[in-house]
Image (cartoon, rainbow, N blue to C red):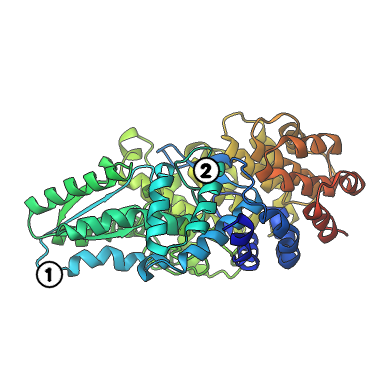
Amino acid sequence: MSVRSVVGQLNLADAVRRELALHNRLLPPRWDHLALVPEHERVEAALRPLLRRGPSGVRADIVYCNKGWRGVRPLHVMPLGDRILYRALVDKIATALPEHLQAREPVGDFRVAPIEHPGVSHISQTDVAAYYEFIDHEILANELVGQTGEEPTVEVLMDLLCGTMGRRVGIPQVHTASDRLGDTYIDRARRRLVRAGYATWTYADDFRIASTSLGQAREALEACSREVRELGLVLNERKTFTYGEGRYLKSLTSFADAERELFAQGATEGASDSLGFLDQDYTDADEPIATLGAEPLDQGVDDDEVVSEDLTPNAELDHRRVAAASRAWDLWLDEDESEQVQAGQEAAITQSLLGRALPTLGLAGEEAPLEHVDDILRFEPALTPQVMTYLTNLAATGSEARSRIRRSLDVLVAEDIYSPWQCMWLAQTAGSFRRSGSRHRYEDWLAECVASSPHDGLAATAAAALGRIGRGDPTFVMAAVDRVSPGWRTLAFWGLIGLDRAKAQDVADDKLDRLLLEVTEQ
């Protein structure tokens, strides 16, 4: 079956709509994609002829985002056409997968399932190190074809993955279509463990194994290690534990319990009683639900925890929520900075609380964090998205706040300590405010990023920011449109439209460019 025939069977309309609407909370919102959301049908019409020719073969650009003190997470930025094709191919394959692989069970059910196993005395937990980065395409293809029979579709998918990753190993991180592929891949290990007599459950790359004795638990972990090695993977030794049944049950809420205990110390009644207002987790891309907040930030973030269609802050404030957020801020500000404390659970708790508090403090017009933005970005780099949400929310409270934020941005961009990922967030935030009457240092910084940054994501985001505030040299932005990788090109072009519509019209390459010109017309 030809690529054209395979693509003809895909639901591209739904894939286009979803890819434009979904937002990865680890990356700044894309103004170019937001502009195209109302025109998703015309986007499909523009891209369908190109998609019939198959994957672009373009390697994804990689942005490394901070993961607290534990290094970085690679985020794969694909051209829009490849992203749409990826989702549509996986969606078609998924319809033929067994029911348990079509959608994940609630993570809470996964965590408590071992406790309910008959005769359980010990429960082991572990996960796979750098899971998505080392998924073997040949093994994945064999598993998908064996489970679904969709050989032509799988072949096109493998071609796309090879081009995207630049090798025949790995799948894009932080993309909801990757969840189904990853779950299918790891399910082979789960099935083999179950057939060997080990009660095993998986959620993404996490394993839980229920055993009737400590000896069996040790045997189960060895067997698990062997099975994942057969898939070209290794277990994460730092996250491998075996608990007695009672201790495992306590471990499910240990972080939340410690969080609540710390939070209640010295708190006012309103703040102490309102920790729940700060608790927020996402087990589905579309539906936020309240949780106990039992997972610290440094335990990693699943794809479905960082993808959302909700791009606007909740403007409804409750005085108890504000009190809770203020308490969380005080805890972080007063935290012991000794190496011992920073390496322990208390530091993870204060970081987790601060990340949830910052957006609320911005909405409430609290300016105390504004004086410490540099410290937060320096010492809590993983909280950069939350810091920028704080600034954006604070800016909405009035012109005086916006003036102070602009002055703060001028100071921040003068620093040379932030990662390119952090600078992308700074650039997006700088472009979120209307142009002021006076020129600011951050505007010159944006221009420098466009002209000379070797990081395509930063150059494109800075170009878009200049276009949004309508200040900058379109010549440099035009050069950036050609210089940045295909995954970022339309964002830079969107910035060019904002600076010089006539030049953008003159250099528009295709129907998608012309559609962007049309939808952004004043």
Dot 1 amino acid type:
Pro
Q: Position of residue 48 (x, y in %)?
A: 70, 60
Quadrant including the C terminus: bottom right
Classify residue 389 as left or right of residue 152. Answer: right
Give the image quarter of residue 517: bottom right
Nearest to the observer: residue 357 or residue 35: 35
Classify residue 210 as left or right of residue 237. Answer: left
Give the image quarter of residue 133: top left
Q: Position of residue 234 (x, y in %)?
A: 30, 41
Q: Position of residue 458 (x, y in %)?
A: 66, 39
- Residue at the front extreme of this rendering: 1
Q: Are marks 1 and 2 in contact (CB under 8 Å)?
A: no
Q: Please name the residue shown 78% across and 46% down the image.
A: 493
Q: Give the secondary structure at mark 1.
A: loop
Q: Residue 435: in sight, yes or no?
A: no
Residue bearing the label numbered 1: 118
Q: Position of residue 68 (x, y in %)?
A: 44, 41
Residue bearing the label numbered 2: 162
Nearest to the observer: residue 103 or residue 32: 103
Classify residue 471 as left or right of residue 98. Answer: right
- Residue at the right extreme of this rendering: 502
